[in-house]
Every structure is written in C-alpha cells, then in structure tokens.
Amino acid sequence: MSGLLALLQQGASSLQAQSAYSSTVAHNLSNSNTVGYSRQRAELAAVTPAERYGSSFIGRGAMLQAVSQARDRFLEAQMPGAISREMSSGTEAETLKSVSAIDLDNSVAPALSNFYSSLRSLAQNPGSANYREAAVGAATQLALSFNRSSMAIEASRTGIDSKIEGRLPELNETLAQVARLNVQIREARNGGAEPNDLLDTRLRLGDRLAELTGAQPVPNKEGDLNLTLPDGTSLVAGERAASLSVLPDAANGGHFQLYLQKPDGSVRAPLASAPGGELGGLLAARDGALKTASSQVDQLAFDLSGAINAVAQTGVGLDGSGGRDLFTGVTTVGGAARAMTVNAAIVGNTSWFPAGTTSAPGDARALQAMIDTESTSLSGGTNAAGALSRITADFGATVQRASTMHEGDAAMLSHLGSMRQSASGVSVDEELVNMQKAQRAYEAVTRVIKTADTMLETLLSLK
Amino acid sequence: MRVSDQALYDLANQRIMRARADSTEAGDRVSSGKRVEHPWDDSGDAGMMVRHQQESGRQDGIFKASNRASEELGVVDGAMDQVTTSLTRAKELAVQLANDTYSAADRQGGALEVKQLFTAVVSQLNVRFGERYLFGGMQDGAPPFDANGNYLGDANIRQVEIAPGIMQDASARADVSIKGTAGGVDVMQTLQDFVTALNTNDATNIRAAVGKLDDAIGQVSRERSKVGAMMNVFDVASSMAKQSRDAASDAKGKLEDVDIFEASTRFAATQRALEASMSAAAQQFKLTLLDKL
C-alpha cells in the first residue's frame, strides 16, 4: 500500500518537473524575438535519495534541478569589444559622409577658378566698370565660399556636440541601471537561484553601453558586471555608477569636452582619453577629419588672402590711391575662412580695385601679378589648387579608412553575433521538439498515476 | 552550426539590406553617370579632379584672353591698314602736286584732300574695341589723338598671359609707330607739314613730303608686321590653351565619369543578387516545424 502511495507521490513530483520543463520551453518560445534573451534550459534530475527497499534502491521520480542559461563565455567576452569597434568606425564613417562641404561641387574650388577667370577678364579691360564689378563679385563669391565651407564644417562639428550631449541622459541612466541590477542579482543569488532574466537584462544593457562608450566588462568574484572605458576608467563598480557630462572646451573652439564623475563620487574631471563606441566615433569625426579640414580651409584662406593682398597693396585704383587690401577680416589662421570678406571700400567703389600700378585705366600690371598668385606656392608647399586638392584627398582618405574599418568591424560583429545567436538564441523548431518531448513525458507520467490509481483501487476492492 | 530563429531573420535581413544598398548604389551610378561624386568615392582621384578642374579653368581663362587679344590686334591691324591707305593716297598727291605744272590753286585744292586724310587718320587711330581705345597704351579710356594729331596716350605696352606665368605684348605703340618718338617719322606732323606746303605753294617742301610720307608708310608697315606677329603668337597660344583646357577637362571626366557598360553590368548583377537573397530568405522562412505538427 505504502509503495503505491509513493508511486502516486512520485508521479506528482514528476508531473511538476515536466510542467516546469514545458514552462521553460514556453518561456523560450515567447522570447524568441526578445533582444538579448538567452535560451534557458530546465535541467531535470532524478529525486534523491532513492527509497531503500530491501537490498535495493527504488527511484523516486524526477524533479527540476535548475533552470540555466545557454551562454558561451568565450563569445561573450569578445562581444563588447566588437560592438564598440563597429559602432565607433560606423559612426565616424556615417557622420563624415553626411558632410557635403568638401564635395567637389560644393567646395571652394569652383569659386576659386571663377575668381581667377574674372581677374583674367578684367586684365583684358581693366578700365571697364562692368569687368571691375564682375571681378569684385567673383572675389565676394570666393570669400563667401570660404565662409560657407568653414561654417558648414563648423555646423557639422556643433551638430556632433548636440548628438553627444543628447546621448548622455540615456548613457547615465543605463550606467545606473547596471549598478542597480548588480544589487538585485546579488540578492537573487543569495536566495540560491540564478536570476536568468535579470542577467539577460544586465547583459543587454552592457551591450548598449559598449555601443555608446565602448564599455568593457571586468568580472569580479561577486558576479557583478563592472564596466570600464577602454582606457580602464571605471564606469560601474558594483552598486555604484559613474556619470558623464559635457562642458565647452575653450581650447577646442568651445566644443564639448566630456567630463566624468567616477563611481566613487570623486570630483568631476575631464576624460583622460577618448571613449570608444558611438561617442568615440563622434569625437573622432569631430576632432579628426572635420577639425583637420577646418584648419586646412582656414590655412588656405589665410595664405591666399595674404598672397593676393600683398599684390593688391602694391597696386592702385583708378583714383590713383594704393595700399588697399582686396580681402579683409583675416588676421589669424584660426577662423580665417569664416572671417574672410572683400574690402568694403572696394565693393562700394569698384574703381578702387587695385588693378594697375598707375591710375591709367588700361594698366593691368597689378592684376597680372594677382593672376600670378594662382601659381604661388603657399605655406603647404603647393599653390591654392594643390592645397584644395590635398584638402579633398585627405578628407576622402579619412572617410575611406573609416568606411573600410567599419566594413571589417561590421563583418566581425556580424560573425560574433551569429555565433552568439547559435549558442544562446531560441530555435522555434528545437523548442517545439522539446515541447513534444515534455508533452510525451507528461502523458507517460499521467499514465503511471492512472495505473497506480487502478492498482490502489484493485487493492482496496479486495474483500 | 545551430541556427536560432532570430539569427535566421537577422541574417536574411542583413543580406537583403546589403544587396539592396549595393543595388541602389549601382543604380545611382548608372543614373548619375558619375563614379566619383564625393571625396570618399576615390580620395586620390577626387584630389586629382580638383587639380584638373582648376587647370581647366585657368587654361580657359588664357584661351579667352588670347582670343580677345588676337581680336583686338586684328582691329589694330585693320586701323593701321586704313592709315597706310590714307598715307599712300597722300603720297600719291605729293608726287602729283610736286610737279611744277600745278598751280597754287591746284595745290590748295590738294591741301583740302590731305586735310581730310589727316582727319581720317586721326579717326582711324582713335579706334575702340569694346570700351578701350587701342592706340592709347594704358591710357585707353579716352581718344589717344586729338583733332590736331597730338598724342594723349602713353608709352606703355599692354601684356597678356599666353601660358601660366608667361606674358606677351598685346598692343601697338602709337607713340613710336605714329609719332616716331624713337627717332622715327612723326606721321601726323608730316601730314600737317604737307598741308602747310600745299597751302603755301611750297614746291620744295611738297617734294620733301614725298620722302617723308614714304618713311611714314614704312614705319606704319613695320608696326603692322609686329602686330601680325603678335596675332600669330596669340592664335597659337589660344589653340594651345584650348587643347590644354580640353585635356584637363577630359582628364577630369575620365576620373569622374562612370564606365557606363561596366556600371550597367554591375547594376544588373546587383539586382540579381537582391532577387536571389530575397528568394533564399523566403524559402528559408517557409520551412518550419509549426506547419508539420
């Protein structure tokens, strides 16, 4: 009698185990599209200790031993770095590709060509008011072209500042969330169970932080997810999280500098080195190719206006007066392109354009010297066309490098992502098979219970 | 390799997106006809295109300037031809009226014609091209000769660029060729002296005018020769600048423009790849255990 009752109890516990197995399968199926979810496995085991029956042991059925996650630690260790690199190079490439100021049709090149053409036309007829107007107009167009290029590049850099600032609330909140999850996971583990879904959430947030900053995990024996920037600066330490903020940097044209308040609550200080991930890519674009292009355009504006003004100073207008600059506003290399403008006195009275070395209306000797500046070597060792060519080629090469890097980084991340999915992702087919398996076992256990019940009934009906 | 459903969909998504991006890019190239639109399409070629663009603009400027200079010199040549014709007529009159068979009245009648020739020469030398008086040197904003034949221009010669940094004289010197400042004959004074000799019936000076007018014609002819030589230089320069401009423009075009056959082939290939990736994804999505259980 007692054996049959034990059989019934065994059936009950086994049903619970198969039910848990089915629930785990259902949980997997429900989360087959959940980002960051790792499939879970219900690990069943025989109930121990077995019941002693004479000289033998009779098993006591099955029970749920644990629900574990399918994760490949080797792959997981590689993911943050791969995510960071892909985001960094991709962000840099895409950001730079959105800048059209250095495109062939939008750059200073057409205006420069037009300026020298107008000087040549004026040199043919230096006394002509119409040609003087045209030459002053072309000079104005050249100055505006420099202004526009400089402002477009600067607008891109300022836009990046806004993007960086816009990312910070999410970044700081995510850091705080990871710190809170560290606490919750510790508490859950103290209860003896593995909080799989919390672990998934924390890992997903870790991935997001890798995307944003290139944050790398640093394992500790408490099982916390501690995070650092690529240079080792701590972002999350146990239950404490750092926070990032920005302040204008006067040494970098007022563009934002990232500041960090460490998890230990120390005083906010500028980041020692650039982060990785999206922020790293944005900073690389802002302070790399765009800053270089901005400086190169400024240098060209400074050199070109200087070379032309040096000639203009020796020339005289039709009024017989000389010593006038053609371009004004340029005093230093920094900001030269933005400040460049045409001498307002000449714009207001084009007869003052210093075309000759005398006031004779047919004198184009100063103009001719201005035209010669087209061949003058500027500070970079080439003429203006060469300098423009270099600006275009340098910018293009940087974007090409970032794009090529991104292709490689994206391929690597895609490969690792596939491997991670292979290890941790949910296969609906597989889960359906597991569901069938659980259903069969459940039915079998039910049959056992029914059989035990019949046997008990038979026993009880004995008279 | 174990394949999860998310991996299956992600992979299909990635492949289709990549194939579509390739196809769109290839389509853009076919429709725009450009291989290099942005510096990053080919940084080296983009840099060279800027150089070619500037060179093309520069050579175009030289081409236009040379053409204009040649046209101006053509006008100068025409004016000097007319001056020569006038001087030749004056010389004919001098030869004719030097004969003692002509009376004082005949010679006064001749003086009237020579005076008209003088006025015609002044008018011819005050020729304009556009807004410029061509015989005034750099004082080209006003007529270089007044009604009395006084020269109001200067001794400067205009120069025009015929190649980067290389200049060529582009004007005739009326002070030398007409006024004879370099030891030559003052053409205007010669005509005026001839008129005076005719009016005063001065046979000696009428005969002397024949030789002076001959010298004047020779002097103007020599300047015309120089003008002709300058025109030749500008014609050659114009032709060379045009060639250089076209060569720079072609070079830019070769770097910038797409090979339409290659681009069309690639566009077709990328469309095939897109179709194939879509078909493969659709086939993979079809097979699931859900339909079998």
Image (tube, coloured by chain):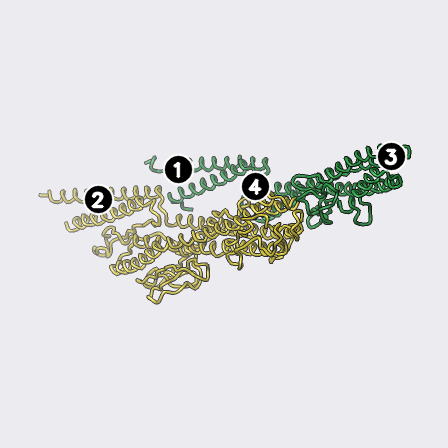
Chain colours: A yellow, B green
Same-chain status of marks 3 and 2: no
| Marks 2 & 4, CB-CB < 8 Å contact | no
Same-chain status of marks 2 and 1: no
Which residue is more in the foreground, A116 or B229? Answer: B229
Seen at 30% across and 62% down, the residue is: A239
**Considering the numbered disc 2 on the image, is that residue within a helix, a strand or a loop?**
helix
Mark 4 lies on residue: B35
Mark 2 lies on residue: A448
- Going by the image, does A459 lie left or right of A95? left
- Is residue A276 at all visible to an observer of this figure? yes
Q: Earlier in the sequence, mark 3 or mark 4?
A: 4
Which residue is more in the foreground, A268 or B136? Answer: B136
Q: x%, y% of residue B25?
A: 51, 40
Q: Which chain does the residue under circle 3 lie in?
A: B
Task: Answer above or below: position of B260 versus A166.
Answer: above
| Label 2 CA crowd tier, 10 Å (few <14, some 14–19, many 20+) | some
Mark 1 lies on residue: B285
- Going by the image, does A375 lie left or right of A83? right
Q: Which chain does the residue under circle 2 lie in?
A: A
Q: Earlier in the sequence, mark 1 or mark 3?
A: 3
Mark 3 lies on residue: B97
Q: Which of marks 3 and 4 is in front?
A: 3
Q: How far apart are marks 2 and 4 (CA)?
A: 75 Å
Task: Answer above or below: position of A103 versus A165.
Answer: above
| Label 4 CA crowd tier, 10 Å (few <14, some 14–19, many 20+) | many
| Label 3 CA crowd tier, 10 Å (few <14, some 14–19, many 20+) | many
| Marks 2 & 1, CB-CB < 8 Å contact | no
Q: Earlier in the sequence, mark 4 or mark 1?
A: 4
Q: Nearer the viewer, mark 2 or mark 4?
A: 4
Task: Give the residue type that dot 2 points to.
Answer: Val
Q: x%, y% of residue A249?
A: 43, 61
